[in-house]
Image (tube, helix red, strand yellow):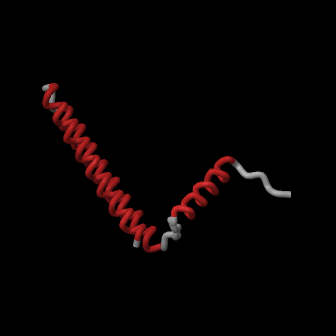
């Protein structure tokens, strides 16, 4: 008798079949890759935390609404840039 599968397991099987049909191959990460990815994540987590602290301390000293909006936009751009850099580096490692 076949074992019942959860909806998660069924969905993962469908995705795996879809990837195989599209020609996407799945390779497990090596320990070196895992270590490099962890280091990149830690580095960028620290950078994002630093940007967050600096942003909030600058906001506390700023009372002009227009200037606060400019600071918010700059902060969002910095976060997006850091996140994009992190994701690109991780993707590069995964591709080998």
When the figure is inspected, residue 70 is found, relative to residue 82, above or below; the finding is above
Q: Is residue 85 left or right of residue 12?
A: left
Residue at left offset 23%, top offset 44%? 77
**Picture quadrant of residue 37:** bottom left
Q: Residue at x 67, y 52 (%)?
A: 10
Q: Is residue 57 left or right of residue 22?
A: left
Residue 19: horizontal and vertical position, in percent?
A: 54, 61
Quarter of the image with the N terminus in it: bottom right
In this view, the residue in front, 47 or 93, is 93
**In the visual, does 73 lie left or right of 31?**
left
Who is closer to the viewer here, 77 or 9? 9
Q: Nearer the viewer, residue 68 or 77?
A: 77
**Residue at the right extreme of this rendering:** 1
Looking at the image, which residue is at 23% across and 47% down?
78
Q: In the displayed structure, does residue 27 sit left or right of residue 43? A: right
Residue lying at 34% horizontally and 53% vertically, measured from the top left: 45
Q: Residue furthest front?
A: 21
Residue 53, position as x, y percentages in the image: 26, 43
Total number of numbered discs in the rendering: 0
Q: Is residue 38 above or below residue 7?
A: below
Quadrant in the picture for the C terminus: bottom left
On the image, the x and y values in percent for residue 3 come to 79, 55
């Amino acid at each position: 008798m076949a074992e019942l599968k959860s909806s998660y397991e069924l969905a993962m099987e469908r995705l795996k079949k879809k990837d195989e049909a599209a020609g996407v191959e799945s390779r497990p990460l090596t320990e070196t890759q895992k270590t490099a990815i962890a280091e990149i994540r830690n580095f960028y987590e620290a950078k994002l935390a630093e940007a967050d602290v600096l942003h909030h301390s600058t906001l506390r000293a700023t009372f002009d609404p227009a200037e606060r909006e400019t600071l918010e936009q700059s902060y969002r751009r910095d976060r997006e840039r850091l996140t994009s850099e992190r994701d690109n580096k991780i993707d590069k490692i995964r591709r080998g």
